[in-house]
Image (cartoon, rainbow, N blue to C red):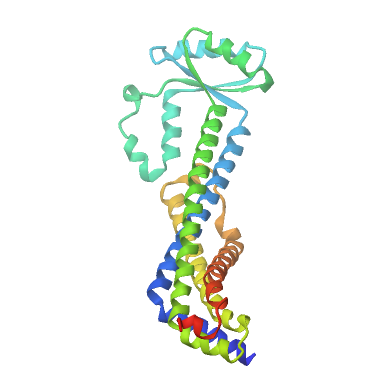
Amino acid sequence: MKNFGYLLKEGIKNIWTNRTMSLASVAVLMSCLLMTGAAVLFSWNIKSAMGMVEGNNSIKVYIKQDVPSLKAIQIGDQIRKLDNVSTCEFVSKDDGMKQMKQMVGEQNAGLLDGLEGDNNWLPNAFRISMKDLSKYKETASKITAIEGVDKIYDYQALADKLTHIDQIVGNVGLVIVIALSLVSLFIIANTIRVAMYSRRLEISIMKSVGATNGFIRVPFLVEGMSIGVVAGAIAAGLLHLLYYYVVSSQGISSVFNVVNLNAIMVPVVVLFILVGMLFGALGGIISIGRYLKKEGGAIVGW
């Protein structure tokens, strides 16, 4: 226990002695963990949004702008007569503008002021549910064939776009995370290598008097793992702050059921710290090997 306390103290001492390199190691490793966490949270939220979209058994049918409201209502009667149409709800351009103001939130609703009445550029529309989604294409073709129908907006198209965005973010994020991981290992390894170089005479003496490789190795592993703990804790805290700033300030939480990070914050912090410790330990192992293979005066170049 006494030896462990000494080794732990020496590891922490190394961090302070090489504080500039240690700070750089913390910053890079923190960036790596933060990017990884952000990419995972983004992917989770995209999948949540896709679940909402794909679970919505409805499509929007937009009527051409030059079609009067009375004619639009008659078009709705034609749509209701189709066999596969379950419900057909008329959404006037005024109702559409009200819904849009609700979506953007009270703080941004002022941007849409003055767009009521004749200035409303939204088209009349119908919200439609189908009885059998397997007949979607057939039913959509019949709807678009009706005179006055402009286009159909189906949620599957949105789901496809979300999937595409998720794939792009995932691929780009993976490349960045791999690059940052390698940089993190390189900087941590060099930080510990500098500490070992500054203590090479002490290590040489310890080897000469019979100190085991394990005894010599522990302080430097403590140094690397301590860097990982600090980086992991800071990254988890920043991820929490940035995540809730984005979902709250941008009104995202009012549109989608975003992932509740508070509910999983403890496991996230623990995971970040464990991963940080693993990276720190790997960096230490990489840098320690070359010195422990040497004996006595060879360590200091005698």
Residue beneath the point at 66% across and 16% down: 84
Q: Position of residue 243 (x, y in %)?
A: 47, 54
Left or right: 43 as drawn, with respect to 180: right
Residue beneath the point at 44% across and 57% down: 242
Q: Position of residue 28 (x, y in %)?
A: 44, 62
Label tally: 0
Q: Residue 273 is drawn in which quadrant?
A: bottom right
On screen, 125 above or below 164?
above
- Residue nearer the viewer, 183 or 31: 183
On screen, 219 above or below 151?
below
- Residue nearer the viewer, 201 or 221: 201
Left or right: 114 as drawn, with respect to 249: left
Residue beneath the point at 41% across and 40% down: 104
On the question of residue 147 being in view, the answer is yes
Q: Position of residue 301 (x, y in %)?
A: 45, 81
- Residue nearer the viewer, 192 or 16: 192
The quadrant the N terminus occupies is bottom right
On the question of residue 257 being in view, the answer is no
- Residue nearer the viewer, 262 or 232: 232
Q: Residue furthest front?
A: 302
Q: Position of residue 109 (x, y in %)?
A: 37, 40
